[in-house]
Image: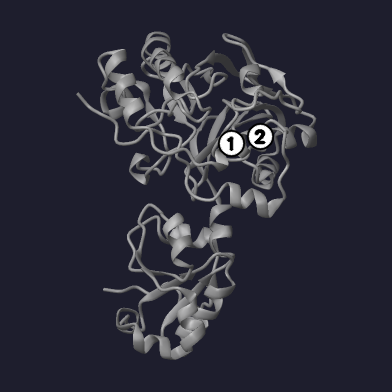
């Protein structure tokens, strides 16, 4: 049975689309981008609708007559909801109008893939009287950042470049931003920490090893406070311990947070994911850094971090990694049992597999590294191009013994 969602509508927002496709649905997603753009980046959600790709040029050339040449689309029942998407929202708006003229229930996704790529949603992780933790999910890229709040103070961990999202969230909570923390100098997306530090006059923290570009060795030209192993920071009633976790980058850190009720949280950056772990080659040193990843995970983390700590990663690869509430977090003890990337028994088996299965590194990651330490400052259009597609920071399809 088809339940209509979009009767009498002509357009929907990225947020509406995400909400509709976070549950079972009968939507048809019609993607009218070019073949190259379609092959580069697909729109995925927890319950991705049936998707059909028909390049916009077909509708430009044939208009309503295009349906005569497209039996699969022509045969879609009038009551079935169709969401049309393109790159910026203009071409899809025209196609949706054509479909409505032909009796279809079709809406345009406002802003297209640009709007989808810039969409963020919030998953509450824990909300106690004296502290709260929120996961900020940039859905299109699988990038996760965090806001911690305690006693009127807030910290943001790994903020993305769309700082308005954090600004509005903090204003809604009525808190002061007192800490900006990056687990590492990201390669897959442009960070917002330095800009927010200037706006809020709040300290921005980064490990100094990640304040050097790994390819050309140029130093950062941003203001930052140096993080070091076992450093302690405070946020209201929350205690934050800095743990140096090199391997994905040489300067990556994890933040081990202890709450007043005894609960423990590990903000693992690109060290540990719900499935897999952070690849070691995004600084161009895969062979040298793979053993460091093993040492960090199987010695430092396994030996020093309590098993009942909740892991809060920097990324996810598939929506299967989410829990029933939509958040991406698991106790560390569960990761040791169920994360397929943690089932290696020896350093040799681990490093051999990693080096034999490293996927190609996107070339734009080199430039994003430059942007993230202030060596380059792209405009909005250039930044969108650099961030095209989902993150590929995890080593997927890992070997299990």
Q: Is residue 190 left or right of residue 138?
A: right
* Residue plotted at (58% across, 16% down): 239
User: Mark 2 highlights which residue?
Assistant: 370
**17 vs 232: above or below:** below
Tell me the residue at 26%/73% (across/down).
Answer: 1
Quadrant position of residue 185: top right
The residue sitting at the front extreme is: 216
Q: Residue 70, how many percent across, how many down?
A: 34, 82
Q: Position of residue 101 (x, y in %)?
A: 48, 89
Q: Around disc 2, counting alpha carbons within 10 Å, would you say few (fewer than 14), some (14 to 19), or many (20 or more)? A: many
The one nearer the camera, 139 or 147, is 139
Residue 35 at least partly seen: yes
Residue for badge 1: 366
| Residue at the image point whose x is 57% and y is 69% from the top | 89
Q: Is residue 159 left or right of residue 325?
A: right
Question: Quadrant of residue 190 in the image?
Answer: top right
Q: Judge by depth and name the residue closer to the eye, 75 or 337.
A: 75
Towards the viewer: 347 or 201: 347
Pick whichever, 103 or 207, lies toward us. 207
Residue 67 is marked as: none
x, y (%) of residue 234? 64, 17
Q: Residue at x 45, y 17 (%)?
A: 288
**Labels 2 & 1 near each other (Cβ < 8 A):** yes
Q: In the rendering, at what x and y percent does residue 40 appear?
A: 45, 55
| Left or right: 45 as drawn, with respect to 11 | left
Residue 96 in the image: above or below residue 103: above
Callout 2: SS: helix
- Applied colour scheme: one colour
Mark 1 closeness class: few <14, some 14–19, many ≥20 residues within 10 Å: many
Dot 1: element: helix
């Amino acid at each position: 049975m088809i339940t209509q969602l979009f009767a009498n509508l002509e357009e929907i927002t990225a947020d509406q689309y995400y909400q509709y496709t976070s549950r079972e649905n009968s939507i048809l997603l019609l993607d009218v981008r070019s073949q190259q753009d379609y092959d580069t980046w697909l729109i995925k959600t927890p319950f991705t609708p049936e998707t059909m790709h028909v390049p916009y040029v077909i509708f430009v050339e044939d208009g309503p007559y295009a349906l005569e040449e497209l039996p699969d689309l022509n045969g879609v029942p009038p009551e079935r909801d169709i969401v049309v998407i393109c790159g910026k929202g203009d071409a899809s708006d025209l196609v949706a109008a054509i479909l409505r003229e032909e009796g279809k229930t079709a809406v345009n996704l406002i802003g297209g893939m640009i709007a989808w790529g810039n969409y963020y949603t919030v998953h509450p992780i824990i909300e106690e009287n004296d502290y709260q933790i929120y996961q900020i999910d940039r859905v299109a890229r699988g990038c996760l950042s965090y806001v911690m709040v305690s006693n009127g103070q807030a910290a943001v961990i790994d903020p993305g470049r769309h700082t308005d999202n954090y600004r509005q969230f903090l204003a809604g909570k009525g808190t002061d931003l007192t800490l900006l923390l990056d687990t590492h100098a990201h390669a897959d997306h442009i960070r917002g920490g330095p800009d927010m530090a200037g706006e809020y006059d709040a300290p921005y923290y980064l490990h100094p090893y990640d304040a050097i570009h790994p390819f050309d060795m140029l130093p950062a030209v941003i203001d930052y406070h140096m993080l070091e192993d076992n450093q302690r920071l405070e946020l209201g009633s929350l205690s934050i311990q800095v743990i140096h976790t090199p391997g994905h980058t040489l300067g990556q850190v994890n933040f081990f947070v202890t709450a007043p009720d005894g609960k423990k949280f590990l903000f693992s950056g690109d060290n540990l994911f719900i499935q897999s772990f952070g690849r070691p080659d995004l600084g161009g040193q895969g062979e040298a850094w793979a053993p460091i990843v093993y040492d960090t995970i199987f010695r430092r983390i396994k030996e020093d971090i309590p098993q009942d700590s909740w892991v809060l990663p920097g990324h996810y690869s598939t929506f299967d990694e989410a829990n029933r509430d939509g958040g991406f977090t698991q106790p560390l003890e569960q990761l040791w049992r169920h994360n397929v990337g943690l089932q290696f028994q020896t350093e040799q088996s681990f490093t051999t597999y990693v080096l034999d299965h490293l996927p190609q590194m996107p070339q734009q990651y080199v430039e994003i590294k430059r942007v993230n330490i202030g060596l380059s400052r792209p405009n909005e259009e250039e930044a969108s191009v650099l961030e095209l597609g989902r993150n590929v920071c995890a080593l997927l399809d890992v070997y299990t013994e």
